[in-house]
Structure formats: C-alpha cells, structure tokens
C-alpha cells in the first residue's frame, strides 16, 4: 500500500468513526417518540401541532448535520486534492468527497436509531416529510424551505459510488413512498368529492390540487417528481371519477350546459383532456344533451302546429302580370308557418349557445366540434320537414324579415340559415322548396331586396356548389329578360299607335318551363289536363297582341299562359244607394279580376251562381272557391255579396256586386284566402312532393350509375354502390334499395349487363 492509499483509507476511517458515533448520536437524539408513533401519515389531525414541532426539530438537526458534513468534507477535499488525483488515477477509487458522502448515507441515514429496532433515520425522515406534506394538503402551513433542504440532501446522495442520476436517494427512497401515499390520498379524495355530488366543487378542488402539486414540486420537493405526481392525479383523482362527475344528477354537464356555466365547463374540459384525448364521457354527455334539446324543439314545433288556430290569416299568393301594387303592411303568416320559422329560430338559438360554449369552454376543440355537428345534423334530419321549414325561414325573412336591417345584419341572418343548410342531408328537397318559394317571391314582387336574394344564391353556391344553384340563377335571368321584354313590348305598342285609349297595361314574365317549379308551369291537375281560363275580351286582345309580338321575335317557341300566378290592378266604381259614387283601386289575383269583370255585364241587383261563374271562366274549381271566398267572405274585402252567407262556397250559391263596399283606403289589396305559398304543406301536398322527389332522385341515381360505369367499364357491385352513394351524398342520402332497383332497371334497358355472379359484377354496354 502506498502512502497516498494509506492516507486515503485513514481519512475515510476517521470520517466513518465520526459519523457513526457523534453525528448519528446527535441526529437520533432529535427523534422524539412522537415521530416514531406517527409513521402512518394518514391520520394527520391528531396531535398535529406536537408532531409538526417534533418533525421540524428533527429536520433542523438533520439539515445542520448534513450541511456541516458537506462543509467539512469540502475543506478536506481541497487539502487532499493531490492525493485525490493520484488515488483516482492509479487505484480507480472514488474521490474522498464521494466516499464520505456514501459514509453519511450508510452511517447516519441507514443506521438503526436504536440497537433493538430496524427503524432507520431515513425511515423517520421519510415519514416526517410525508407527514408534513399531508398537513399541507389538509390546509396547514409548513416550513417549506426546511423540507426543501432535506430533499436537497437526498438529491445529493446516491445508491452507488458512480453516482448515476437514477440512483439518487430521492428517486430510490423517498419518491416511491411519496407517490404511493399520494395515490392513496387522491383515491380517497375522489370518493369524498363524489359523495358531495357537486360537479362544480369537484372541478374547483381538482384544479386547485393540480396547481398545489405543481407548486409543491417546485418549492418543496423536486421538479423530477412533477410529471409523476401529475400521472397520479390524472389516474386517481380525475380518470377514476370524471365520467361520474360529468353525469352527476342536478350538477353535472347537463345542468352546466343548461345554465351556460362556461367557466366550469372549461374546467371539466381541461380535466377530461388530461386523461383522454377524445374526451369521450364529456363528448357523449354534450351530444346527449344536444339531442335531447333538439328533440324538444322538434316536438314543440309539432305541438305548436296542433295547438295553433287554423289559417285565419290571409296569406297572399298571386303576382305576375300584376302591375304596381299599393304599399300595404304584410298580412300575418299562417300559424303553421310561424311554427316552422320558430323551429329554425330555436335551432339557431341553440346553435349560438353551443358555438359560444365550444369556443370559450371547449377551446375550439375540433373533436368536440365534430361531435356537436353530428348531434345537430342528427336531430335536424330527424324532422322530416326540416328542408321545408328552413326554406320557409328564408322565404319569410327575404320577404319582410330583412326590412330595416343593416347590411351586416342581413349577411349574418343569411349566414345563420346557410349554417343550418349545411346540416341538412336532403339538400335536393330543400332546393325544391326554395325554388317554389323563390318563384312566388319573384313573380309577386315580394322580395324586400333583390341584392339580398342574389347574395343568398351566392352563399348557397359557395356552400353546396354550382349545380345546386343553376336553376335558381336561371330564374333570376328570366326575370331580367322579362323586364326588358315588357319594356320592348310597351315601346312596340307606342310606335304602332294603338287607338285604344283604355288599353290594358300589361307587365309580363316569360319563364323557361324547365327552370321553374313544375306545379307553377303545369297545366294539369290531379293528372287531368286543365282547359285554359277564359279571359275577358279586353285582356284577351292584349294577350294575343303580346303573343304575336313575342313569336315574331322568337320563332318556333310556344307560350303557355299561367293566370294562377298573376295579379291585376282594376278600378272599381261603387254606386251607393244614396246616389253617392265611391271609387277604389283593387289589387287582386288574375282569377279574381276575371270574376269581377263578369259583373260589368250583370244588371244591378242580379247575380251569378258559382256554377255559372265556373262555366263562363273555366277557372279551376279549387282556385275559384278560394277567390270567391276572398271577394265575398273575407270581412274587410267583400266586394261581392254571397247568398246564403257562409264560409263554404257551393255551386248554387249566388254572388252579387256589392255597391255598399267600404274601405278607408283608396287602394285595396285583396289576398287569396288559404292559399299562401308560405304555408307548411299538408299531408297530401307532402306526399306529392315526396313522389316527385323520388322520381328526380331515381333519375339522379341512374345518371350517376351510367357516369361511373362509362368510366370504369366493369365494376363489382359493392364498389359501384359505394361510388354512387359517395357521389350523391352531397345532395341527398340515397336509399340503398332504390339504387339496387335502378341498377336492375338499367340492366333491363340494356345500359348495363351482368358479367359475373361471384362477386356480382356489372359491365357497361356502349
């Protein structure tokens, strides 16, 4: 043994004896019986102050012993620097400083506090620090810096001479015990909070615990523990309980959503996100509540329709060849229409509510947005009339709902409607209703703003594509062309020098039959061809004059007149029995004009029966009854008198011209009762619409199948079905059985052929 090696061993021996006798003695003397009895940290309240004082005294002594040892060994190491360098190089031994630290570990920390017990100083240190932490968790104030210095000691001591990072005594001795006691504590804490049955309290306390543990790792223990205690909190306090908290009756997510408790919902979201990237329990609860609220809206709209009084309102309907109409206040809409618009408004309100929650509570989480969107789509599409209701919403707002609104408010209103359109799966059905309602607005000149109408078309084009809006744009084009055509016709009449001073002023709309709704363009009713209405000779001459003018410009075309879509302004003179004469300008439907002009040839005091009127005019029975009701039954517009007086119109009922008609207005508008296009369809109309939709969808399915097969030539059945469904899903959700039937029909008509049976495969026939 060299002299250097001898010196190394002697110093080491000296330190061992000093630590094992004097230092250990001082430290063990500071351990009071209270600390030995308090090795279970669970019961922290009993004799808390006594235990804390004893613990602080022990920790102070241990801290002092450690710091003295570090100081002394630092000075000794400086003196023995040369020896250290030689010993470490020649004998591959640890430095004297490292060796002395290992001695402190073995001689002080790991030595029994008494000869007759296995309890070591390290055991007492562990239980004391855990006890202090438990006190702090219970709301007591503890000496953090003192504990922190003792933790520094454990971080400075290692299990091995080579001092690997993972062999720190803090990580091998203290941290596992700390994590285990924390696990037990937070498991019990979670149960205690659940028993309180208050989601708000759970979230607040859990959030506070998370902040406390983070702070404890930074200022009392070690930052090395922070991710590990986070996992304990996540597993024991949150993951075990969050699903129950979310579903707590009376205080859970349902209650928080109903009361817009955005702050608490955000805490629940953040807690859920810690333990589950998909936030499954929260997502499920939110979807469930949206579905419930959506079903309530659907049910309330049905209940509203049933409890509301039948259509007593005069929903107006006609206007094409009508001239200038007096500016009168809009009549109240049909109660069913009110229910439809209320349904849309309620959904928009619900959408606004959940948009706010999604943005502020769920931090614009994309997964939550998808879940919310799915729930809205499901309950909206569960209402068979959603497409019709949304179209009525647009119809009502574009007619009068945007009056007085700023440009930004109009834009916002249209955007809200487009948002709902995004949810609707049967967009082709919506297109059918929108086209029907748009045609009425255009032909009756009911639109509050043509700019808003075009803006709406532009928004729909951006949302659902150009194909969706082609026909709608064509309708606007027809209206523009018709304005130019009317102006050209009037100029033509002026230049021709028409001698008739009482000539009827005609304003015409020429519509492309394939672009406008079929019920407007059709001359059939219930499958039967309707004979054209017999117009008064004054009107008939103007009609023929325009036909000649138009066909000269457009050879080969055919005009089909639609008096059901027109209005007229007529001047009426009422001879009072007193001899006084009263004049009014009446704005009526074209059919009402035809009826009223009949009475020019009826002597005063004589009448026409309903049957006679029908024979002389050929007005369809349904339209005739409605117009007669508006002229003779509606209280404020009784231009005709009816005998017997009743709401119903029978073929034998007599009608007289009412010279005693009175109105405070010079210009009187007479709407057509029960015929508003802005009404919800009845069951028969609904069936008719569905029948037409199925025919159109069948044609769309066949076109898609042929398009796909023409490109692919041969295709397996499953692949063809998948591609067809994919192509058509943007417009509607195709029925699988309908697709199969259409494929069979194409095979029968030799557009396709079967080329294999297993698996079923089709080939395209060129």
Image: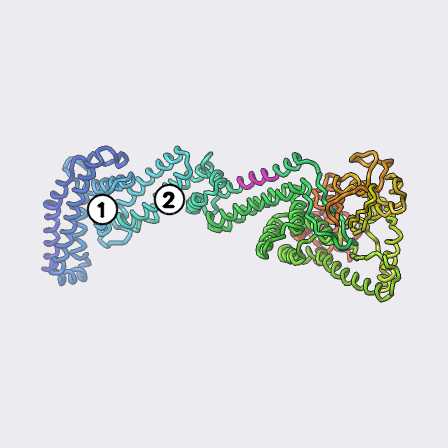
Residue 312 in the magenta stretch? The answer is: no
| Mark drawn on residue 207 | 2
Q: Secondary structure at mark 2?
A: helix
Task: Point out residue 696 in the picture as x, y percentages from the top left corner.
Answer: 74, 49
Q: Main secondary structure of the magenta part?
A: helix
Residue 666 visible in the snapshot:
yes
Task: Point out residue 493 in the picture as x, y percentages from the top left corner.
Answer: 84, 63
| Residue at image point 70% right, 41% down | 313
| Mark drawn on residue 697 | none
Work out which quarter of the rendered image holds the C terminus and state it.
Answer: bottom right
Q: Residue 2: which quarter of the image?
A: bottom left
Q: Secondary structure at mark 1?
A: helix
Indicate whether 560 appears above or below 296.
Answer: below
Distance between mark 1 and mark 2 Cα atoms? 24 Å
Residue 688 visible in the snapshot:
no
Task: Point out residue 301 in the picture as x, y percentages from the top left corner.
Answer: 63, 39
| Residue at image point 19% right, 58% down | 92
Residue where numbered disc 1 is placed: 147
Q: Which residues are magenta?
A: 289-298
Q: How many residues crowd mark 1 within 10 Å: few (<14), some (14–19), many (20+)?
A: many
Mark 1 or mark 2: whose residue is earlier in sequence: 1
């Amino acid at each position: 043994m060299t002299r250097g090696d001898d010196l190394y061993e002697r110093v080491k021996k000296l330190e061992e004896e000093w630590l094992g006798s004097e230092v250990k003695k001082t430290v063990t003397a500071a351990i009071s019986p209270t600390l030995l009895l308090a090795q279970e940290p669970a019961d922290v309240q009993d004799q808390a102050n006594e235990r804390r004082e004893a613990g602080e005294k022990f920790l102070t002594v241990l801290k002092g012993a450690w710091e003295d040892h570090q100081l002394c060994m630092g000075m000794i190491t400086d003196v023995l620097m040369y020896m250290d360098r030689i010993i470490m190089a020649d004998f591959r031994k640890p430095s004297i400083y490292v060796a002395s630290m290992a001695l402190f570990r073995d001689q002080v920390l790991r030595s029994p506090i008494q000869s007759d017990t296995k309890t070591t100083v390290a055991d007492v240190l562990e239980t004391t620090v855990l006890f202090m932490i438990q006190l702090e968790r219970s709301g007591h104030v503890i000496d953090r810096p003192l504990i922190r210095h003792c933790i520094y000691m454990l971080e400075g001591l290692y299990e091995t001479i080579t001092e690997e990072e993972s062999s720190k005594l803090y990580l091998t001795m203290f941290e596992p015990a700390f994590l285990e006691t924390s696990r037990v504590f937070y498991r019990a804490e979670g149960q205690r909070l659940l028993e309180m049955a208050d989601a708000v309290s759970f979230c607040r306390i859990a959030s506070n615990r998370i902040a406390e543990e983070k702070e404890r790792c930074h200022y009392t223990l070690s930052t090395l523990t922070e991710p590990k205690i986070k996992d304990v909190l996540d597993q024991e306090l949150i993951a075990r309980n969050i699903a129950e908290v979310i579903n707590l009756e009376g205080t859970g997510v349902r209650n928080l959503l109903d009361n817009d408790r955005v702050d608490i919902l955000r805490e629940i979201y953040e807690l859920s996100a810690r333990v589950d990237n998909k936030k499954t329990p929260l997502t499920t609860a939110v979807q469930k509540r949206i579905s419930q609220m959506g079903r309530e809206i659907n049910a309330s709209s049905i209940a509203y329709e049933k409890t509301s009084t039948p259509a007593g309102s005069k929903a107006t309907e006609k206007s094409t060849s009508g001239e200038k109409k007096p500016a009168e206040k809009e009549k109240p809409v049909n109660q069913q229409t009110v229910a439809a618009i209320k349904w849309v408004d309620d959904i928009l309100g619900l959408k606004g509510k959940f948009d706010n929650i999604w943005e502020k509570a769920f931090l614009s989480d994309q997964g939550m947005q998808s879940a919310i969107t799915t729930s809205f789509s499901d309950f909206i599409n569960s209402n068979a009339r959603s497409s019709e209701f949304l179209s009525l919403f647009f119809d009502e707002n574009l007619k009068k709902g945007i009056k007085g609104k700023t440009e930004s408010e109009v834009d916002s209103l249209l955007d809200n409607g487009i948002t709902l359109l995004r949810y609707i799966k049967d967009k082709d059905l919506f297109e059918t209703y929108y086209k029907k309602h748009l045609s009425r607005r255009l032909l009756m000149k009911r639109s509050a703003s043509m700019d808003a109408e075009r803006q709406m078309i532009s928004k729909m084009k951006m949302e659902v594509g150009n194909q969706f809006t082609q026909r709608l744009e064509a309708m606007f084009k027809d209206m523009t062309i018709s304005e130019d055509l009317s102006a050209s016709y009037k100029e033509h009449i002026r230049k021709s020098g028409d001698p008739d001073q009482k000539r009827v002023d005609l304003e015409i709309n020429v519509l492309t039959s394939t672009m406008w709704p079929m019920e407007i363009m059709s001359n059939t009713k219930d499958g039967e061809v309707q004979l054209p209405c017999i117009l008064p000779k004054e009107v008939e001459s103007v009609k023929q004059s325009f036909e000649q003018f138009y066909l000269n410009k457009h050879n080969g075309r055919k005009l089909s007149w639609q008096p059901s879509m027109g209005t007229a302004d007529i001047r009426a003179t009422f001879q009072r029995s007193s001899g006084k004469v009263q004049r009014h300008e009446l704005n009526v439907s074209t059919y009402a004009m035809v009826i009223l002009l009949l009475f020019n040839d009826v002597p005063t005091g004589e009448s026409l029966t309903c049957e006679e009127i029908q024979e002389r005019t050929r007005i369809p029975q349904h339209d005739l009854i409605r117009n007669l009701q508006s002229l003779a039954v509606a209280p404020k517009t009784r231009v005709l008198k009816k005998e017997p007086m009743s709401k119903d119109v029978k073929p034998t009922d007599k009608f007289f011209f009412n010279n005693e008609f009175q109105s405070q207005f010079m210009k009187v508008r007479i709407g057509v009762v029960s015929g508003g296009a802005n009404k919800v369809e009845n069951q028969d109309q609904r069936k008719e619409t569905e029948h037409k939709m199925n025919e159109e969808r069948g044609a769309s399915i066949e076109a898609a199948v042929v398009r796909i097969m023409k490109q692919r030539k041969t295709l397996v059945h499953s692949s063809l079905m998948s591609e067809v469904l994919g192509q058509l899903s943007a417009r509607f959700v195709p029925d699988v059985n309908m697709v199969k039937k259409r494929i069979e029909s194409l095979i029968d008509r030799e557009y396709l052929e079967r080329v294999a049976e297993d698996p079923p495969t089709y080939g395209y026939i060129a």
